Amino acid sequence: MHKSGVGAKFISPPSGFRGNEKVLKGELFVEEYAEKQLYSFLDYISSGFELSFMVAVDFTASNGNPRDPGSLHYIDPCGCLNAYQRAIMEVGDVIQFYDSDKRFPAWGFGGRAYSGTVSHCFNLAGSPGAFENFTLSGPTLFGHVVNKAAEIAAESLKYNQRKYFVLLIITDGVLTDMQETKDALVRASDLPLSILIVGVGSADFTQMEILDADNGHRLESSTGRVATRDIVQFVPMREVHSGQISVVQALLEELPGQFLTYMRCRNIRPHNVAAA
């Protein structure tokens, strides 16, 4: 159609009212078009792109005393995993295959150091005895850990690293910095970053659905800026366990699409993949 310059005619079929008469309803002409190669998630991964895993753990008091078997942070001497451990293991076990060094930054938020200061982003990596240095406190703030993950993703861009970052946030509570978190997520939507949120326990997680933006309405910052894309996936663990799908399936369902949206919007091609 483009080469010939001939349009496609749209004609209504004959009707009893018009007899055998056909009526031309319109014509479609193609003045210009472009062909574009769309690469798959596996095209990028097989050409050397990596997923870099990061995790943030809720240290707020609503989790309960870690020494109490009813606490969400209770370490079972028999080796039974708590909700936090289970979420980290299930997601980390999948993403580690796409990460060459398999070294994952880990932070806590909402914990009080024994100096008395509450921190909303403190290092957990290599610190299995974090409860010896921090006590559970609050409130529940996401903005700090989202900004920290965004800093790492932005730094990677400076060096043109072929990395896409995935931050897993595990929480039991209701956000008290919703607007600050929205602002951080809107800024982060320009970066190679996705954020997975797991809700553990019995809290009301209605706010998290707002962050997920699955209703088609992208997040808006306090300055009126709209997110470039959706980068959040939220899953309440209690609902997942009541169904047939696993936590990792529910969490990672949207990740390939978010990854591809970022790559395509920035016209980033996989390396050493022949064009079709």
Image (cartoon, helix red, strand yellow):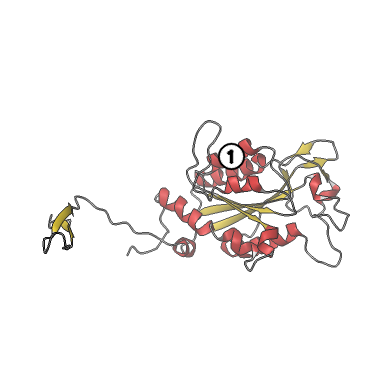
Q: Is residue 206 left or right of residue 51?
A: right
Residue 142 in which image quadrant: top right
Q: Is residue 72 left or right of residue 49?
A: right
Residue 80 spot, x, y in % from top left: 80, 66
Residue 164 spot, x, y in % from top left: 53, 53
Tally the marks: 1
Q: Amino acid at mark 1?
A: Lys
Residue 133 spot, x, y in % from top left: 83, 46
Quadrant showing the N terminus: bottom left
Name the residue: 88% across, 54% down.
Answer: 67
For label 1, the SS is helix
Q: Visible in this render: residue 99?
A: no
Q: Is residue 220 left or right of residue 94?
A: left
In this orientation, which residue lies closer to the viewer: 185 or 70? Answer: 70
Q: Which residue does the numbered mark 1 point to in the structure image? A: 182
Residue 90 spot, x, y in % from top left: 67, 64
In this orientation, which residue lies closer to the viewer: 135 or 254? Answer: 254
Quadrant showing the C terminus: bottom left
Q: Is residue 94 left or right of residue 258?
A: right
Residue 252 in which image quadrant: bottom right
In this orientation, which residue lies closer to the viewer: 270 or 242? Answer: 242
Considering every residue shown, the one lying at the far right of the view is: 67
